[in-house]
Amino acid sequence: MWLRVPSDFVWMRSGRRTVLVHEAAKASIGTLLLTTPQGWAQGGVRLASGRGGTYRVALDGGEVVVLRFYRRGGLLARFLRDKYWGWPPRPFVELRVTAEAHRRGVPVPEVLGARIERLWNGSYRGALVTRHVAGTETLWELLKRTTDTERRRRLTRGAGYALRLLSEAGIYHPDLNLNNYIVREEEGNLKIFVVDFDRARVKRTALGASLRRRALRRIERSARRLDPERRIVGAGELRALREAFGSC
């Protein structure tokens, strides 16, 4: 598979390490990714999202980024943990999809760089860096502490609208769940971002009805798994999400 690199990103290499980085961040993010990200992660704040390998890191000069190390889930995590095979590497594919989603008007954090480190057995470890969006928390965490029913429906309505933007932009997110939305409130207005585009795909046109239904079912399953008793995301909240998403 051929990897189409966004025009404003450049390659950097050192030994077994290969980095794809935004040209404006070459001197900062690129240089750090060519060293040892684990080192600067230790000075960061570990975030609850992801599989335990996501950190908020303040860099020299005041810039704040989110560094995510790739971790496997499920049964494979016990044996492989952070090792992957194949081309193109998943961090570079995710960078490309996230940058394209941003270009097409989807609310996503700006992606700054990705890195792989080749290992002796042909596998690699990966990492991705995005710009930190200040003042956000995951949609699920916000829903859990929101007692007002109308506000919860407003939140799920915003999630449905973000899913609609994704679909109209031709971006299929195969693992969209309530923890892959982050929310910021500005003067009473909600700003909802979509994160974690690992294994996402870019289509030339808007998603067809089948993929739209699949994406909607995925987010509904997420709500059922996180809230099996439907105390937080009930029928009204899901109806608000579907109405904002639109007919499939």
Image (cartoon, helix red, strand yellow):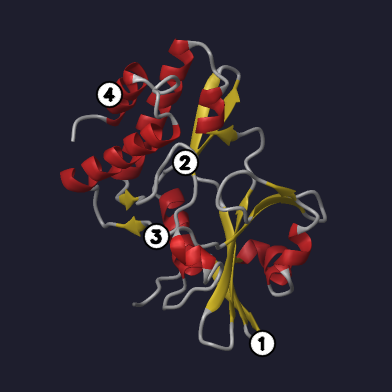
Say what secondary structure mark 3 lies in.
Answer: loop
Residue denoted by label 4: 243
Disc sitting over residue 107 in the figure: 2
The mark lying in front, picked from 4 and 2, is 4
Residue found at x 42% / y 78%:
86
**Looking at the picture, does residue 197 appear above or below residue 190?**
below
Q: Earlier in the sequence, mark 1 or mark 3?
A: 1
Q: Position of residue 90 (x, y in %)?
A: 46, 68
The mark lying in front, picked from 1 and 3, is 3
Q: Inspect the image, locate mark 4, and give the three-letter code of the amino acid beneath it.
A: Glu
Which image quarter: residue 114?
Answer: bottom right
Q: Are marks 2 and 1 in contact (CB under 8 Å)?
A: no
Disc sitting over residue 15 in the figure: 1
Residue denoted by label 3: 199
Say what secondary structure mark 4 lies in.
Answer: helix
Residue found at x 78% / y 55%:
59
Whether residue 246 sits left or right of residue 222 in the image: it is: left
Q: Position of residue 153 (x, y in %)?
A: 41, 18
**Looking at the picture, does residue 229 appear above or below residue 59?**
above
- In the rendered view of the protein, which quadrant contains the N terminus? bottom left
Q: Earlier in the sequence, mark 3 or mark 2?
A: 2
Separation of marks 3 and 2 at Cα, in angstroms? 18 Å
Residue found at x 29% / y 21%:
239
Say what secondary structure mark 2 lies in.
Answer: loop
Q: Inspect the image, locate mark 2, and give the three-letter code of the amino acid beneath it.
A: Pro
- In the rendered view of the protein, which quadrant contains the C terminus? top left
Q: Earlier in the sequence, mark 2 or mark 1?
A: 1
Residue found at x 45% / y 58%:
74
Q: Earlier in the sequence, mark 4 or mark 3?
A: 3
Q: Inspect the image, locate mark 1, and give the three-letter code of the amino acid beneath it.
A: Gly
Say what secondary structure mark 1 lies in.
Answer: loop
